[in-house]
Image: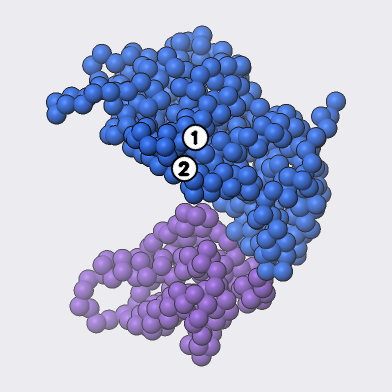
Chain colours: A purple, B blue
Amino acid sequence: MNLDELYQEVILDHYKRPRGAGLRDPYEGESHQVNPTCGDEITLRVHVDGDKVADISYENVGCSISKASASVMYELINGVSVEEALAKTAEFTALMNSKGQGKADEESLEDAIAFEGVSKYPMRVKCALLGWMAFKDALVRAEAATPAGGND
Amino acid sequence: MEAVSKLDVEAVRADFPILRRMIGDKPLAYLDSAATSQRPVQVTEAMRRFTEHSNANISRSVHTLGAEATEAYEGARAKVADFIGARSADEVVFTKNSTEAINLVAYAFQNASVKPGADPRFVLRPGDEVVVTEMEHHANLIPWQQLCERTGAKLRWIGITDVGRLDLEQVDEVINEHTKVVSFVHVANLLGTVNPTSQIVARAREVGALVGLDSSQAVPHIPVDVTELGVDFIAFTGHKMLGPTGIGALWAKAELLDAMPPFQTGGSMIETVSMERTTFAKAPAKFEAGTPPIAEAVGLAAAVDYLDKLGMENVRAHEKELAGYMLRRLETVDGLTVIGPRVPIGRGATVSFDLADVHPHDVGQVLDADGIAVRVGHHCAKPTCVRFGVTATTRASGYVYTTTDEIDRLVAALEKVRKVFA
Ligand SMILES: Cc1ncc(COP(=O)(O)O)c(C=O)c1O
């Protein structure tokens, strides 16, 4: 196995210096996700303002892959529209589930392309997806908590 | 005096083809025997021979193959019984694994508790207590937790000291006149601790409680004699003692097996059956409903033969040396903290540790790149993790085929882990 492929510099950097970490107010949706095989955990909050993901804040414990993935996600989708955030989530999820066959689009996924190699390690895919699952879940909760039909 | 190992480890290794496997371009260093051990050719060969020559269902036919299969299966039972010092082969019940063996006992309590006229030793009521320890594998915790939930009995446990041993000072308080059963781990799978049994067994006797052991990590590694231990039941599992998966065993005193209601019911465990009612066969058949794992029993018998030939005293001495070497070498790694006893006394060659707060999944991944197989995670012992303030550990575990060279490779690779994640 090629370790450098899995633990790319970008991943180690996000692991050592996570972006956007810490829980913040305000938020409309919060999600707690656990990966029982290795005990990774994340609590993640989403603050939606209009159609924008105004803030993602999180607290997590876990391995380098799960922590780096949450940090990369923060950089990628914090401040973008809900629609774009969901599109990127779908794109990243598909990449992770590609069993090493997927080709990451740097234009769209930026630092997250460093995770391309992770998709070859089935035991680690869950780690990489934990934060993203928390985001999707928190977003659903946020939408449920906010009155429907509002335009602003 | 240090016992000197009489195992010829190189000769042992020659019997395990998997140990010649390459992981990428690195030779495998298998340090995960506490999760499952590898199998010598003698075991695979015995199972193959049975399958190709004598395969049939047991106790159901008069044909030659049926007779051979029955003989092989019952022969395996006798061999296992002998290996653990049981008085009679009928005291050994084959199960799927340790987990099923422990559930069998827990369900005997549960079934007795709702059955009029059941043996009072197995009847649990609110006010009664069940005792385990804080260092249990989930297999010897959750069945009792569930049993207590269903009967209203109370689950209590003996704690762990900071150095990873049972806090024996709690024994007299935790085990008391309310205690109906004590079930505790013989050798702990996360900490590696070999628990002293005599004080707990004596206390259980004093208060009239039944007492048993989860010997899953004991029977493979140290000489176990149930008569000497003086307990009522023990559970163990084939795949950790050089045998196949799919077979384990419960040993219990004959008189208790007679008193226990059956666990699963169906074919092969009956005496007479009518549409209205059934009477049950005598133990062990009473607890072996359905077609049992026959080829697996043959494999387990071959594993027992193999261990017998090595001599369990030699196995123990080898692992004591190995444990000493592991502890000495691991302590040289900067930032490494052993979780569990740090001296090779009253412990086996299973060592859990934390490495400078690097997540065990990352440790395991870097080790795997060097061909080194360790276990990472909570090792099905979450309460132990909580006790030591970690969510997971990295665990290296050795067995009869483990060399000091493999430990050296582990230590070198751990240095690499520190570099990557520093
Ligand atoms: C101490 C202990 N008890 C019980 C078990 C469960 O064994 P099995 O999974 O074979 O039932 C294990 C194995 O992981 C163990 O180490």
Picture disc at residue A55: none
Percent x, y of residue B126: 32, 20
Q: Which of B208 and B252 is in front in this view?
A: B252
In which quadrant of the rendered view does residue B155 lie?
top left
Read off the residue under disc 1: B72
Amino acid type at circle 2 is Ser
Q: Is residue B246 above or below residue B62?
A: below
Q: In which quarter of the image is residue A81?
A: bottom left
Q: Are marks 1 and 2 in contact (CB under 8 Å)?
A: yes
Label 1 CB, ligand 1: below 8 Å?
Answer: no
Q: Name the residue under label 2.
A: B54
State the quadrant of the N terminus of chain B: top right
Label 2: few (<14), some or many (≥20) within 10 Å? some
Residue located at (31% from left, 66% from top) = A141
What whole-number distance in Å separates the C-alpha atoms at marks 1 and 2?
A: 9 Å
Chain where mark 1 sits = B
Q: Residue at x 39, y 62 (%)?
A: A31
Residue at image point 52% right, 32% down: B76
